[in-house]
Image (tube, rainbow, N blue to C red):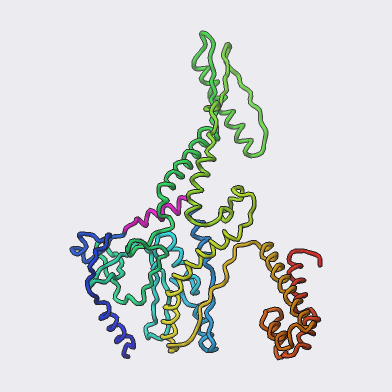
Amino acid sequence: MRNPFSRWFAGREESAKSSRTQTRDAWENPFALALQGYQPLKFNLDLYDLMREAVPLLDVAVIKLVRLIGDFELTAQDPRVQQLLNAFKSGVRVNHFSSGLNTWVDQLCDSALAKGMGFGELVPSEMLDDVEQLKIARANDFRFVERNGCLLLGQAREGVFNVLPFANQDFIYYLSFDQRDGHPQGYSLFYSLPFVVKIFLRIQQAIENQVWRVGDPTFLVTVQGGRGGDFGRVKKAAEDLQNDITEVFRARRRGSVRDVAAAVPEGASIDVKILGGQDTILNLQVPVHTAQEEIITKTGLPPFMFGLYKWTTTERMSNNQNDMIVANINSYRTKIDPIIRRVVDTFLILRGEAGANWKLEWKEVNLLDKTEQARARLLNATALDKELNAYQRMFEMGMIDEEEFVHLVRNGGFLPKKRIKGINRAAGLLQVIADGDGRNGAVRGARRLLGVEN
């Protein structure tokens, strides 16, 4: 069977050849030409992995941002195409054991946020009639290779400098949310945080050391023999007392209560102290808080999303905070859109539906709490109520004619479209309003959400 993509791939290879640029990239390596055009990574991705593992705030930040990016819908007018899109979105195999286009996008975004760049692959079936699977690759293994003035993606194999470019770059998808100065490698969310994380971990280690030394005390038992006493007898008394104290604490762990009785030689004395008991655990709350502020500020998320409710006097966000986070999420979505469209278009081409019309629609991002949303709905419904009432009175007073009234009511969003379908006369619209399907129903619904009596 002739490969239907062979001519297309050949054209892509020819178009990949481009003229040499005049400006020199600041990230170019002087040894790049001697090393097969290999371009080294600018940042240490293994360090980012270690930072995410060591600091839970960073891990939570990436997970929260991926969840906020959220879900999307693939819609098409053609029922056959819609059926294909639904099956692909929910059932396409991802890596080895997962499934669903959302799973693939979430993993790609996770890698792009944490490491600055994410790499995905579409694997077509052997007969080029379907998508076999979608795959996410480990970003740490990817490198950039220059060929004929163009950068290609390659994967390091058997050593750093043995980078082999992929034969078919069109099935490789690269996502980066933050790129600067023309460097192909993206900037991680953790960029500029290694120094802060180092301080934070040092504080955490200091807390652990203090807990071991002071918070979990060790008892120091001293048996002092009298003048002319037998050292062996004194030592034996000290060992017996130590064993008794140890057994007492074991009994307490089991929920029992025991006492200690000590027998010492004549003239001996016993002194029991807590080793380091005169010391106190240092208050490191302020430096910990300062380090956490630096980290959370970099993520762009509010503290309460990390469970830090004590930082603010209220758990609710202002509209300005909500708008800023939503704008940030929409920026992420804008960069993901082309990748999703390429994947879906490739799937439709393989299934014989090339050129099919379809839309990608993201679900709304809203971080405000339910009470604030209900309050906003009440305000909007109240405004509609007053506006609709004004139009009704203007019509009854003869200030506007029937045609103007019908036009204002039908296009103002006051009444459900299904309820007023086919009604083109003022009498019919006034009857719908009187039945409560319009302003009164909207206001009552919003009031019920808030628990407000009518």
- Quadrant assignment for the C terminus: bottom right
In the rendered image, which quarter is residue 326 located in? bottom right
Answer above or below: position of 221 versus 141: above
Q: Position of residue 257 (x, y in %)?
A: 67, 33
Q: Which residues are magenta?
A: 42-56
Q: With 44 as the anchor, is 221 left or right in this view?
A: right
User: Is 437 colored magenta in this rendering?
Assistant: no
The residue at 26%/66% (across/down) is: 163
> Residue at 56% of width from left, 72% of height from top?
363
Residue 262 seen? yes
Residue 118, how many percent across, how many down?
Answer: 40, 66
Along the viewing direction, whichever of 96 and 69 lies nearer the viewer? 69
Would residue 386 appear left or right of 337 to someone viewing this image? Answer: right
267 w.r.t. 83: above or below = above
Instruction: Tell me where residue 34 sits by quadrant.
Output: bottom left
Q: Verify whether residue 47 appears in magenta.
A: yes
